[in-house]
Image: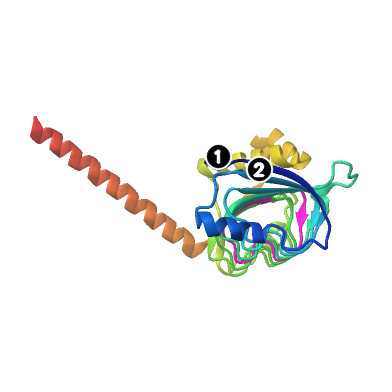
Amino acid sequence: MQHLFRGVFKITNQDRAVGTMLSNEISKVYLGPGLPEDTIQLKFNGTAGQSFGAFVTSGVTFELEGDANDYFGKGLSGGKLVLYPPKEATYNSSKNIIVGNVAFFGATSGESFIGGMAGERFAVRNSGVKVVVEGVGDHGCEYMTGGIVVVLGDTGRNFAAGMSGGVAYVWDVNKTFIKNCNMEMVMLDTLDAEDERLLSSMINEHQQVTKSNLAAHVLSYWPTTFKQFIKVMPVDYKVVLEKRKAEKKSAALKASLGNNEFNLSSN
């Protein structure tokens, strides 16, 4: 049984790749699965240097009250990263960038909640991380192959360029998204009840851990705000998902018919 560890630390922009060596040591002992969720919880205050939370593994949760430089969450590997502005901040975090460029580059798994805007090339080559952010710069979700990205605000230009997997949800309250989306490999799909449950759950958790006023607003007017979300789905990825869904349904039907035949023969 692992013992829980909690800690609070100051951080400056001279502190780079915080969490990488820790996760390496954990992986040596516990391998890929890592530790149980929230076994290690560390709180940081200040401005983090480049690659904060890079390659953080399962069981490790980092909470940063402040802001961060480029490559935040690079190669995230199962860990959890929470970022929000200082409590004494007077600016509107949903209108200001609090994390630099190329966040979650090459990330494979885990989750993150960012109570503010991110810079350019957000979630490039993300293949499995689930993240909520309150706005992104140019080239968001470029070459993304998996995971879920929820953007509670505007995006820059060329969003979803080369995106072949995963799903993005954008709250397009300002009606600016369509002109910023690269439609070469994606489509703007219809949201259903499953999408609503997923979005509601992720935004609720985002609000709880970041205390985001924007998320609270979105949830307060949910019947209206939900209709303002746009679902970005890679075309080929949707075909694969629908094929898998049909195969699963067919297998379930065959199993059900087989059970009925068995019951009839037994009687």
Q: Which residue is mark 2?
A: 5
Q: Residues within 10 Å of mark 2 (few under 14, many from 20)?
A: few
Q: Are marks 2 and 1 in contact (CB under 8 Å)?
A: no
Along the viewing direction, whichever of 17 and 191 lies nearer the viewer: 17
Q: Secondary structure at mark 1?
A: helix
Q: Position of residue 132 (x, y in %)?
A: 67, 49
Q: Is residue 147 left or right of residue 14?
A: left
Q: Is residue 265 left or right of residue 94?
A: left
Residue 243 counted in the magenta span = no
When the figure is inspected, residue 67 is found, relative to residue 236, above or below; the finding is: above
Q: Amino acid at mark 1?
A: Arg
Q: Looking at the image, is mark 2 or mark 1 nearer the viewer?
A: 2
Q: Is residue 219 left or right of residue 84?
A: left
Residue found at x 53% / y 66%: 164
Number of numbered discs visible in the structure rendering: 2
The part of the image, by quadrant, that contains residue 97 is bottom right
Residue 129 counted in the magenta span = yes
Q: Residues within 10 Å of mark 1 (few under 14, many from 20)?
A: few
Rendered-image quadrant of the C terminus: top left
Q: Amino acid at mark 2?
A: Phe
Q: Which residue is mark 1?
A: 197
Q: For residue 142, say whether it is visible.
A: yes
Q: For residue 188, say whether it is visible.
A: no
Q: Secondary structure at mark 2?
A: strand
The part of the image, by quadrant, that contains residue 213 is top right
Along the viewing direction, whichever of 188 and 266 lies nearer the viewer: 266
Q: Position of residue 192 (x, y in %)?
A: 52, 44
Chain part drawn in magenta: 116-132
When the figure is inspected, residue 65 is found, relative to residue 160, above or below; the finding is: above
